[in-house]
Image (cartoon, coloured by chain):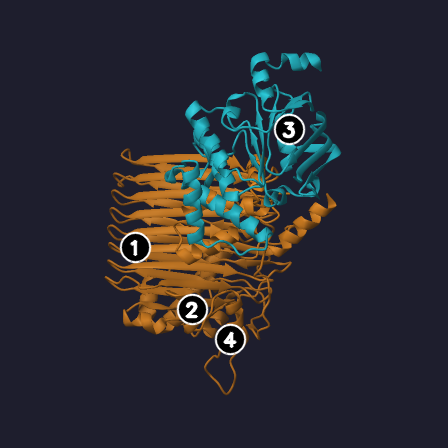
Chain colours: A orange, B cyan
Amino acid sequence: MKKKDNILKRLANKAYEFGFVSKIKTDIIESGLNEDTVRLISSKKNEPDWLLEIRLQAYRHWLTLEMPQWAHLNIPPIDYQSISYYADPLKKSKENKNKEIDPELMKTFEKLGIPLEERLALSGTAVDAVMDSVSVKTTFKEELKEKGIIFCSMSEAIQEYPDLVRKYLGTVVNYRDNFFAALNTAVFSDGSFVYIPKGVRCPMELSTYFRINAANTGQFERTLIVADDDSYVSYLEGCTAPMRDENQLHAAIVEIIVHDNAEVKYSTVQNWYPGDAEGKGGVYNFVTKRGDCRGHNSKLSWTQVETGSAITWKYPSCILRGDNSQGEFYSVALTNNYQQADTGTKMIHLGKNTRSTIISKGISAGKSQNSYRGLVRVSKNADGARNYSQCDSLLLGDKCGAHTFPYMDIHNNSAVIEHEATTSKISEDQLFYCNQRGIGTEEAIGLIVNGYAKEVLNKLPMEFAIEAQKLLSVSLEGAVG
Amino acid sequence: MENLLEIKNLHATIDGKEILKGINLTVKAGEVHAIMGPNGSGKSTLSNVLVGHPAYTVTEGEVKYKGKNLLELSPEDRSHEGLFLSFQYPVEIPGVSITNFMRAAVNAKRQYLGQEPMNATEFLKMMREKRALVNLDSKLANRSVNEGFSGGEKKRNEIFQMAMLDPTLSILDETDSGLDIDALRIVAEGVNKLKREDTSSIVITHYQRLLDYIKPDIVHVLYNGRIVKTAGPELVMELEERGYDWIKNEN
C-alpha cells in the first residue's frame, strides 16, 4: 500500500510538465487595486481617454458587485488587494527605447513548444505569445497583413486600430455582465486582436499562447475577434503556468463577432497549473467567453479541452442573433485530485432557424468535482430553432463527483430541443482486459479516456488534437490506484 | 521437450473462498492441453490466476513459465512474455478502435522487448494479414473494441488479437461458448493456423465439440479445484459418453 501511495505521489507531481519558472527581469507594479491602479495600467499602455473612462466605469461598477456564488464550486476567499495587476517581462533600457525581448523569454516559449522565430514555427500557425500582462511577440504579422488580416496584441490594436477596437470592444461582453467581466474590463492588460476582412479566408491557424510566469500576479487578458462578412478563421488558444503553492487568478474575456456568412472556430487547450495532489496551489480560471453571431448564416464553434486550473468557471457561449446562424460547443473537461470545474455553455437563440449543438464530455478522477452547466434559451421570435445537447460524464474511482445542470428556457413553440445525458465508469474489467494484452494501466486509462473524448478531440486542428490527447493521458496519471 | 509451464500445488482464493486446491500441471513446448470439467470446478479461475487477474489471490504453490516465477510478473509482463488469454467474456471498450487498441498492445510488447515501435504502414499491413486468418471484417477493425459485437464476432476478435500478439502459450477459456457451428469452425481454424511447433495452448472447455476441431495431445479433468484425471485424446469421447457424474462419484 505504501509503495502504491508513493507511485501515485510521484505520478501526480510528474504530471505537470510546464511548472517551471523563468528568470526574467519583470516590471511588476505594486499589488493592490484602486482607481490609481487602473490609471497606472492605462497610462503604461498609453491608452486613449475613452478607454480609461471605460476602465474606470468598470472598476466603479465592480466595487458594487460580489463574487458569484451560484456555481457548484468551493472558492476560497480571494484577497484582491494582495494581487499585482500588471507584470511586464519586456525590459526597457535607457539606450534602447524600443522594448527588446529577453533571450530567456524566447527560451521559455521554446521550452513550451512554441518557437517564436518564424523559421522554427509550426507550419501554418501564426502565434501571439503573451506572458503575464504583455504580448511578447506575434509571428507572421506581415504575411497576414498582405491579405488585410489584422493579428496583433490588444495593446498594439488600441494604438494602431483604435476605431475598430472602439467599435467592437465590450459589445459582446459588457463590463456589467458579471463580477469577473467588470474586473477584467478595469484592469485588462493584453491579449490578442483579430480582424478578418470581408471575403477573406485566413490562410493559417491563428493562435495565442498565454503564459503566467511572475508570482503573485493575476492575468487579465482580453481577446477580441471580428470576422467580417464571408470570412473564415480558425483560432487556437493554449495556456500554462508555473507550479506554485499560492493560487493565481486568471480572469479573461474573449469576445467574438461573426458577421454575415462568416465562420469562426475557437479552440482552447487549457492547461493552467492545476495544483498539487493535495490540492495546494493552482490557477483560478474565471473567464467569460462569448460570441455574437450577428450576421445571417454566421457560424461560431467553440472547442475546449480543459485539463488544468484548480478551479474553472467558464461558459463559452453563442448569441445566435442572425437568421440561420449556428452555434457549436464541444467540450472535454477533465478534473483530477482536488480540481473543481463548473463549465458549459449558453446558446441564446434570437434569430430564425438558428441551430446549436452541445457535446460535453466530463471526466472526473481523484477527489475532484466536475459540473456541466448549460443554458439553451429560445426567444419568442426565434422560429424554427433547434438544439441538440449531449452531456456525458465519466467517473474514475468513487471519491469524485460529476454533476449536470442543464437549463432550458423556451419561449417559442416551434423549437426542437433534444437532450441526452449518460454517466459511466471505467471498470476494473476493462483495465484488466487491457493489461492482459500488455497495455499498462496508465496507458489503458489514457486510451479509454481518449476514446471517450474522441468526438470532441476530432474537432480540434490536427496538431492540437495530438497535444490534447497526450495531455488527457498525462493529466490522469495516478488517477486510478 | 522443455517445460514451458510448470504448475505445482497451486492454491488460489477469491473473496476468501478457496477455488483452486492444489493444481499440478506441466505443459511442454508444442503441446495442446485440454482442460475439461463441470461448471464451478475452477477452470476459469485457473486461467485468470495464470494471467494475474487481481481479484484472485494465490495462497500456496508455484508457477514457472519459461523458467521464470510467473506469479511475480505483472499481468502486462506476462502478456509481453507471450502469455495470452482468450476471454470467456471479452470486455467492451467504447470509443477505442480495435486498430488503436492493438497498436498500443503491439507497441507495448515491442517496447518490453527493446524494439522500436512499429510504423503505421507496417502495422496496418500486419492487421490486414492477421484479419484474414479469422475472416474478421475490415469494418469490424474500425469499430470500438467488442462494442455491439455478436458473440461470434467477439470470439473471432479474441483470436485475431491472439494472431497479432503471437503468443507462446495461449489459454482459450470457453472459446466455444455462445458460438454456432460455423462460427466455431472459423475460430478453431484460426487457432489451428496459428499453431507452431514451439507454441502451446491450453483449451478450457465444458463440451467436446471444440475439441473436434482443435485436437488436444493431453486431456485433463478438473473437478473441485484439482486435476483428477489426465489422459490422451480418447478421454474426450469417454467424457462425452459418460458425462461428468462418474468423475464426481470417483472423487
Amino acid type, mark 3: Thr
Report the chain holding disc 2: A
Callouts 1 and 4 in the same chain: yes
Amino acid type, mark 2: Ala
Foreground of the two, A14 or B95: B95
> Is A139 on the left-hand or right-hand side of A220?
left
Disc 2 target residue: A121
- Checking the image for residue A263, the label placed there is 1
Report the chain holding disc 4: A
Amino acid type, mark 1: Glu
Disc 4 target residue: A90
Foreground of the two, B233 or A331: B233
Q: Quadrant of the C terminus of chain A?
A: top right
- Whether residue B12 is situated above or below residue A402 in the rendered picture: above
Please name which of the two marks, 4 or 3, marks the residue nearer to the observer: 3
First-in-chain label (2 vs 4):
4
Report the chain holding disc 3: B
Q: What is the spatial separation of the Cα atoms under label 2 and label 1, in whole angstroms?
A: 25 Å
Please name which of the two marks, 2 or 4, marks the residue nearer to the observer: 2
Numbered disc 1: secondary structure: strand
User: How many C-alpha atoms fall within 10 Å of the one at disc 3: few (<14), some, or many (≥20)?
Assistant: some
Q: Is residue A65 visible?
A: no
Numbered disc 3: secondary structure: helix
Q: Quadrant of the N terminus of chain A?
A: top right
- Checking the image for residue B45, the label placed there is 3
Q: What is the spatial separation of the Cα atoms under label 3 and label 1, in whole angstroms?
A: 58 Å
Numbered disc 2: secondary structure: loop
Q: Are marks 4 and 3 in contact (CB under 8 Å)?
A: no
Amino acid type, mark 4: Leu
Please state the horizontal and vertical placement of residue B186, each as a whole percent of the image.
44, 30
